[in-house]
Image (tube, helix red, strand yellow):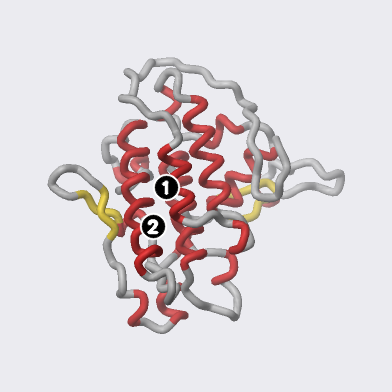
Amino acid sequence: MCAGHQMTGETPLDWTTRVTLLLGVARGLACIHREYRDSTIPHGNIKSTNVLLDKNGAACVTDFGLALLLSPAHAIARLGGYIAPEQSGDHKRLSQEADVYSFGVLVLEALTGKVPAQHLQPLPDAAGNSAQRKDKQAAVSLPEWVRSVVREEWTAEVFDAELLRYKNIEEEMVALLHIALACVAQLPEQRPSMADVVRMIESVPVDQSPLPEEDVSMSPSIGITTDDGLSY
């Protein structure tokens, strides 16, 4: 599963397929967390390259258990842009809460069409305004970039241009964005369980993707509540 099709030249996935695959990943990860709840064993390496499709096109989560054979530092290094904030410090460890964060990044990847690498964000100037000069930009993670765009009330810029071609899925995209932002909360204890994530995704009404249109406009500002409890 790869949402960053702009870089790979792959045919972009339609809306229904993206949500269906994400739900499949969520169910698989929730099953792992449920089976190993008492021992709190995580997957440890949730990212798009570890999501494969079976012969029926269903999503399958791979690589489970391999991270547990590595040292925590080496296992976390493999996460790349899917690493949770608490894993970047001295206290490096795998956890089910960090799995939830990685899944949230995966959802953002599917919504934005961007790979979870470092993205440039304008730095505020002395007056508090966002500077536009290239030398006044900082590299941030995909979740940080999404939050920054939402704070500037330009939520439409978050979504993959391919998704904006579909009609009448605005509310569904925003609902999935809410779920992703909950998963990538800064503090582990603020993130939902994967069982809750499955229920939330299942509540998003997704029918067969409508035919894309050549020019579908979307309101640049959509109400979003981020993990800090503020609405934009």
Q: Amino acid at mark 1?
A: Val
Q: Amino acid at mark 2?
A: Ala
Quadrant for residue 38, please give it: bottom left
Quadrant for residue 18, please give it: top left
Label 1 element class: helix
Q: Are marks 1 and 2 in contact (CB under 8 Å)?
A: yes
Q: CA distance from mark 1 to mark 2?
A: 7 Å
Q: Which residue in the structure is indicated by mark 2?
A: 30
Residue that sits furthest to the left in the current view: 55
The answer to whether any part of residue 7 appears in the image is: no
Q: Which residue in the structure is indicated by mark 1?
A: 198
The mark that comes first in sequence, 1 or 2, is 2
**Is 216 left, or right, of 25 in this rendering?**
right
**Is 232 left, or right, of 62 in this rendering?**
right
Label 2 element class: helix
Q: Residue at position x 58%, y 65% from top? A: 85
Quadrant for residue 191, please give it: bottom right
Decide: is 60 above or below 149.
Answer: below
Decide: is 146 above or below 161.
Answer: below
**Is 147 left, or right, of 126 in this rendering?**
left
Residue sitting nearer the eye, 204 or 164: 204
Residue that sits furthest to the right in the current view: 127
**How far from the left and from the top, in percent, is residue 137?**
66, 51
**How far from the left and from the top, in percent, is residue 102?**
46, 58
Bin the neighbour count of mark 1 within 10 Å (Cα to Cα): few under 14, some 14-19, many 20 and up: many
Decide: is 205 above or below 9.
Answer: above
